[in-house]
Amino acid sequence: MNKKVNIISPVDGTVIAERNLATLADVDTVLKKSILAQKKWQRTNISTRAKFCHKAIDWLVANTDELSREITLQMGRPITQAPGEIRGLEERARYMIDIAESALADQQIANNAGQKKPASTRFIRRAPLGIVLTLAPWNYPYLTAVNSIIPALMAGNTVILKHSAQTLLCAERFYQAFEQAAQDPDLHSEFNGDVFQYLHLDHDMTAALVKNDAINYVSFTGSVTGGKAIEQAAAGLFKPVGLELGGKDPAYVMPDAAINHAVVNLVDGVFFNSGQSCCAIERLYVHEHLYNEFVEKFIDRVEQLRLGNPLDEKTTLGPMVNSKAADYVREQIQQALSMGAKACIDGSEYSNGPFSNKPGTPYLAPQVLLDVDHAMSVMKDETFGPVVGIMKVSSDDQAIDLMNDSAYGLTASLWASNEKNAIKIGDRLNTGTVFLNRCDYLDPSLPWVGVKQSGRGCSLSVLAYQQLTRPKSFHLRTEV
């Protein structure tokens, strides 16, 4: 008998879908199809791959309204914000498709002017790896998955997607999109639709699939614990693994910051998606020259957030993914308060009605903590929720030391007017990305990469194609 999994909506606790988990026979069938499809797919030209991928993205964009509602029901993001994920997916996908030809072009090696005969033709070609397994999380179910799916396909690989149990419907929607694209009369004769497939799996079956010799690359986005499990499953198999893990991303508001701009964008960077983003701002360091003004304006802005039913268009802060996640954040807040932190937001203001801030529910009021330090969990351990600690600093050096005092290194944002000084500070930060006067945005032309426990490898940009291919050297002697 098949094992089953239910998607329980954080909106109201109802079961919105029930699915069978794949059996060993299902996995074997998908792998066989993917192996056969990849042999043909890698021989298709890049323009054909581009048409296929563009048409799949066309389908997803055309169904934005339906997909957005499903995002809200599955993981709780406010309905007015959910369409932005599909817009972001389109931006990343179109960019990665459009740069594929140049990113995958042969690299010609010129002969030296004085080179002795025999003459040779030499070049480096990017060869596909084979089958790419994408393991996607629930918090940005389309954006995170597309980071590997599109460049993997454009590079001549086939893809198998295993999505989080919370957002299984997104895997099925991706499949529908690619299935629809494969039916196009201009493409159907070139290959079959098996270049993209999905599987619903539990943890044990996922680990077994990672170990399978047919899988040539694993792209995982999720927790540090999950990343360690993937690395352990792949240990000794000599297959590449890309990991995009957690974050404890800091922001530093410098003396020359445009304070109003910083407040608006940092509130969004902290609380968007209920703080459930790997690159959410979780630590704020503010220079003493504008600390009081910043804190006052920041709190005022946070108090304007409206916690409630994410299907209500007036809601700006939805529930967390489940009550367990929300209770963990509540524990972090209580620990900080017991150690001397000061809470700035009165949670009772959010405690009315069925979608309110109550212990044991996924609905959690936003919180801003002052008088915090790095002995507190909320300032050192990933929170992944709607709370931020703010510390006063007296110098750039102090801010840099505090920002680097973390097991994570995904992004850091600086808020200032002096770009040259920001670059100097950025060079001293141990992160994959440094922002100035913005945060929480993935530019597809730049590699998305973390250091320390935030992961290894990268996605997006031309560098993503190096992750998803291998170099193959051609040395052709043209004179004999």
Image (cartoon, rainbow, N blue to C red):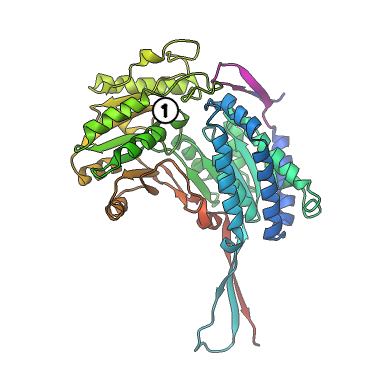
Q: Horizontal and vertical percent for residue 411? A: 38, 44
Q: Is residue 449 above or below residue 230?
A: below
Front one among 366 and 190: 366
Which part of the image, by quadrant, shows the N terminus? top right
Q: Horizontal and vertical percent for residue 301? A: 36, 27
Which part of the image, by quadrant, shows the C terminus? bottom right
* Relative side of 183 to 372, left or right: right
User: In the image, what residue type sits under mark 1?
Assistant: Gly
Q: Quadrant of residue 224?
A: top left
Regarding residue 415, the answer to whether it shows in the image is yes
Regarding residue 198, the answer to whether it shows in the image is no
* Relative side of 421 to 150, left or right: left
Q: Where are the magenta residues, as a range?
A: 6-22
Q: Circle 1 sits in a helix, a strand or a loop, which is it? A: loop
**How many neighbours does mark 1 have within 10 angstroms: few (below 14), some (14-19), or many (20 or more)?**
many
**Which residue is denoted by mark 1 in the rendering?**
385
Which residue is located at x 36 percent, y 36 percent? 266
Front one among 87 and 459: 87
Q: Quadrant of residue 372?
A: top left
Which residue is located at x 73 percent, y 36 percent? 25
* Relative side of 155 to 178, left or right: left
Front one among 155 and 316: 316
Q: Horizontal and vertical percent for residue 369? A: 29, 25
**Residue 322 on the magenta span:** no
Q: Quadrant of residue 89?
A: top right
Q: Horizontal and vertical percent for residue 80? A: 54, 29
